[in-house]
Image (tube, grey):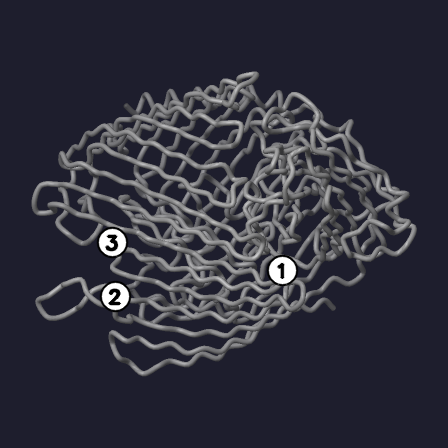
Amino acid sequence: MAARATTYALAVFACLLAATVNAMAQKQNAAYQLHIHRASSPIVIDGSAHEPAWQSAEVATDFWMVLPMDTGRAKVRTDVRMAYDDHNLYLSAICYFGDIPGPYMVESLRRDWAFGNNDNFIFFLDTFDDQTNGFTFGVNAAGAQWDGLLYEGGKANLSWDNKWTSAVKSYDDRYELEIAIPFKSIRYKNGVTRWGVNFSRLDLKTTEKSSWTPIGRQFPTASLALTGDLLWDEAPPSERSNISLIPYGLGGISHDYLTNAPSRARHDVGMDAKVALGSALNLDLTVNPDFSQVDVDQQVTNLDRYELFFPEKRQFFLENGDQFANFGYATIRPFFSRRIGLGGVPIRFGARLSGKLNNDWRIGVMDMQTGEAEDQGLPPQNFATIALQRRIFSRSNIGVIVIDKESANYRPTGITLSPSSYSRNLGAEYNLATADNLWTGKLLYLRSFSSGTQGNGAVYAGNLQYNSRRWLIGGQVENVDEKYSAEVGYVPRNGYHRGLVTIGYTFLPAGGPVLSHGPTLNSSNFFDWSGKLSDYETTLGYTVTLRNQDVFSASAGSDYVRLLQPFDPTNSGREKLQAGSEHRWDFWTTKFDSKPQSVFRYGFSTLYGGYYAGGTRLNWTGTLGYRIQPYVSLAGAVSYNDIRLDEPWGHTKFWLVGPRFDVTLTKTLYFTTFVQYNEQQRNLNVNTRLQWRYKPASDVFLVWTDNYVPEYLQPGQNVPGLFSVRDRALVLKWTYWWNL
């Protein structure tokens, strides 16, 4: 079995080297050029391009259709112009309606809306023209803003937030928009007069997604490898001073009703600062930060044997955060910033330097200091990370990372979460991305060092993927040492070899109601460190997408698990299956998502088949959404699990219900109520948040959070009944973004 994993590794490595030759090709859409000139007159951001500066600006038009088909020009017309002055980059877009009558379609006025559920215009800036990292900005047809960081060639992190302004005006046959982005809000290299740029439009009534440059339907329009060129008549202005101070003040009160302890009051102040070192490097500083404005994590029913992953949303960690957070793979992350400062552990101060040294080199240096958490047995800890990346060929790169976690006054107490006084990781990776975007891949090596006896091990892994209009072919191998440790990372499993293969094909009918359809085969095999098979899952699925954007898929598969440690198949604190026991079962799934252009949306998924210990599992989920555009968005999700096992587990049922109510009174005033009932965790959470964005990137938050025990808790009884309050908290927070 170990020989099979080694064969996978050698095959992936050989293909990765072969694909590297293609990575040296030139940028595919370099012939698409838009010249940008200094504005000939002042520009007022009011949504109407009536100023003389716009009349003389060059126009990007004649977009290409990406969906439903990528074989011709877009039917819905879009005209884009750009200009600049000493302080701002400006964009104007006129988005004409198609032949289908009716109003535009949007979810709400909330920021960072879901791309596929809104008529919208967005654009992408590759300010270093490296086809790897950049920025995205845009608005939906009602004027709600979208902004994010682009990483890994076209993935967007919408948790990033910065200062910029926009306005939209609607007419019978079109909507017009204007955007002003301060040069202080983005990073770029001084003296460079060519950026990558592309523009994307989605019109839900015609189900047409379009792009200024031609892009294959299998790629997102955010693909930086497929941008055109933005050519400046002179180098963009270099800001002499670019310092932002972001203070906050917070007050709140909380009460634990189960322990009946006295109410606790909170009153904190702190500050973040952003200091631009030139136009390409940024220094982030923080003192006594607070992250109470972050949305609550979406709860799930956890039937997995390993730790779940929840993404980072805190602003301090986001800019250039991909250099730290995306090192490795989704389940082999040597650095995971949520290990720092969550779970009641206070961050005292921190600093982070990140950005571009030049067109080929990126750097990231971070140091964070946390305080003591006595209730968890954790001493003060220091987290230091250094990441360096060197671009090679057109879009590929080589990166290294060093991670160090040190515990001050380390005294093992038996309850501490840290098994060692220090934990370090050293890693290197090669990331392949070809100029035509068809081939991507990675080679990874990690080494851990620890003061403990179990923290000194290695990881070596690699993958390669080919993604064309019709074919998706990928292979991946992972080898994680039994003694490998990443205390600052996310590596839920170690001591294994893994081989993963994906093969998919897409049929593209020329006409009829079906837009595309095709099968996908996935096979994943885990072996323990000695080479004996421990897990496999093989699935064969089929997906059908209609021209109206309804999507239906079905699959069937087979699972095998040999438990390496005891496991409760209900994950609810009951008896555990023995390590070494073997379990096999078959299953089938279905999934449906309705068309996004309807004001009423719905979807469902089902899973039925065997389970551990000869049992069965039924799971179904449903989602509903209704919008009263653009002010109200109602959404709900429900999940039900029915697990039938022999005693001592018997018949187990878990409900997970999560309605969400969004009211966007204006583009700057949002009200959200999110309810989550999790039967597995025996908890009902209600989170209500009022947010007022009184200035760009400056907010007032009022957050009310309740947790309820959805049952009576009496001696000898556990009878469902009236809900009793577990704990309650009220927080008021103010932030202000001040540019010096």
Q: Amino acid at mark 3?
A: Gln
Query: Residue type at mark 2?
Result: Val
Residue 307: give x, y in percent of width and height.
Answer: 33, 48
Spatial distance from mark 2 to mark 1, Cα to Cα? 36 Å
The answer to which of 306 and 648 lies nearer the viewer is 648
Q: Position of residue 489 (x, y in %)?
A: 42, 49
Foreground label between 2 and 1: 1
How far is disc 2 from disc 3 in space, using C-alphas?
12 Å
Relative depth, front residue between 141 and 474 = 141
Mark found first going from the N terminus, 2 or 3: 3
Q: Residues within 10 Å of mark 3 (few under 14, many from 20)?
A: some
Q: Residue at x 61, y 33 (%)?
A: 206
Q: Label 1's element?
A: loop
Q: Secondary structure at mark 3?
A: loop
Q: Earlier in the sequence, mark 2 or mark 1?
A: 1
Q: Residue 646's spot in the image, x, y percent?
A: 9, 41
Residue 225, placed above or below residue 279: above
Q: Position of residue 300 (x, y in %)?
A: 34, 50
In this picture, residue 172 sits left or right of residue 262? right
Q: Which residue is mark 2?
A: 709
Q: Which residue is mark 1?
A: 667
Q: Which residue is mark 3?
A: 680
